[in-house]
Image (cartoon, grey):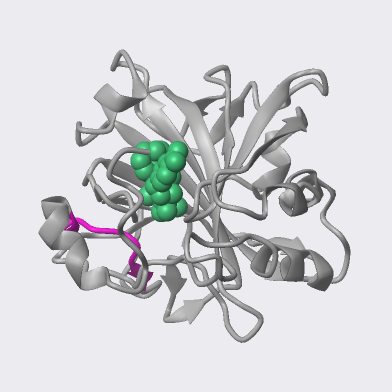
Amino acid sequence: GKGHSHWSYEDLKHWSTDYSDCGGTKQSPINVDTDQAIFSPDLRPIQLSGYSLPANKQLKLKNNGHTVVLDLPETLALTGGYAQQYRAVQLHLHWGSPSGPGSEHTINGRRFAAEIHVVHYNTKYDSFTEAMVHPDGLAVLGAFLEVGHGENQYYNEILKHLPEIQEVGQETLVSGFNIAGLLPANLKLYFHYNGSLTTPPCYQTVKWTIFNHTMLLSRDQMSVLVSTLRSPEDELLQNNYRPVQNLHGRRVLASFQ
Ligand SMILES: NS(=O)(=O)c1c(F)c(F)c(SCCc2ccc(C(=O)O)cc2)c(F)c1NC1CCCCCCC1
Ligand SMILES: [Zn+2]
């Protein structure tokens, strides 16, 4: 996209000179200190509607040089857990390398192997680009990915296509599947806080939901994720996560005790 391409995870200091919000006081990601999280019983279970897509619905999967992005139809909606309705825009992943983890958020200082973000915009705005400049404009659902025993069939729907989009700018089509399978079955246990996009322009317009349950992939699947895509420098695209940012007094809420 315009202006996105010349930043990198190497020269983080320049982000705030080129994009002023990146130096703001409501930045993401953050470390969640579970002892400091405030139990909020009014936080309702997250409800997803329209997430199960028929196989004849084709979705665009792209290596945009910073991550792998799956474009999502606006028919996917967040109907619970948020005061207003949000519709899906895209989902993407953050990961590390064979020598270390790469989630963006951390829990009590622990970094997980990888993290999925499902980006939505508030339907009270006419479009995503309009919504993303308003404080209640965006809602991102985040879940951590770890290595477990079995192969994860849902993540396979994305990972099996990564060899087709190794180069920056390459795209392919993915047949529809149940996108909800990429998120934990239990959508009741989560942390909630107000933050930002974790990439320039770093707009401070995201209501974040970070699920407590993690997704399990096989060792081979995680290896494909961290060692297939190439970067704009034509090296392996790895460690595409932003360091955790200062809370500046923000409270993290928890839907559970
Ligand atoms: N964690 S996050 O949600 O902030 C996030 C990242 F951390 C990201 F790193 C990204 S990818 C970097 C931004 C980008 C670059 C190129 C293109 C393109 O060529 O189409 C598109 C986007 C990325 F796309 C997103 N999400 C985007 C935020 C960037 C601008 C609007 C697009 C929807 C959400
Ligand atoms: Zn992200």
Residue at far top of view: 126
Horizontal side of 53 relative to 127 (left or right) equals right
Indicate whether 18 appears above or below 145.
Answer: above
Horizontal side of 185 relative to 137 (left or right) equals right
Horizontal side of 194 relative to 23 (left or right) equals right
The range drawn in magenta is 22-32
Residue 191 visible (yes or no): no
> Residue drawn at (31%, 56%), measured in percent from left and top?
6
Q: In x, y percent, where is residue 65?
A: 49, 54
Q: In x, y percent, where is residue 79?
A: 50, 24
Horizontal side of 99 relative to 191 (left or right) equals right
Residue 228 visible (yes or no): yes
> Residue drawn at (50%, 72%), measured in percent from left and top?
239
- Residue 12 lies within the magenta run: no
Q: In x, y percent, where is residue 256?
A: 48, 57
Q: Quadrant of residue 53?
A: top right
In the rendered view of the protein, which quadrant contains the N terminus? top left
> Residue drawn at (44%, 72%), measured in percent from left and top?
106
Indicate whether 11 appears above or below 229.
Answer: below
Q: In x, y percent, where is residue 174?
A: 74, 33
Depth check: 96 or 54 in front? 96
Residue at far right of view: 150
Residue at far bottom of view: 99
Residue at far front of view: 234
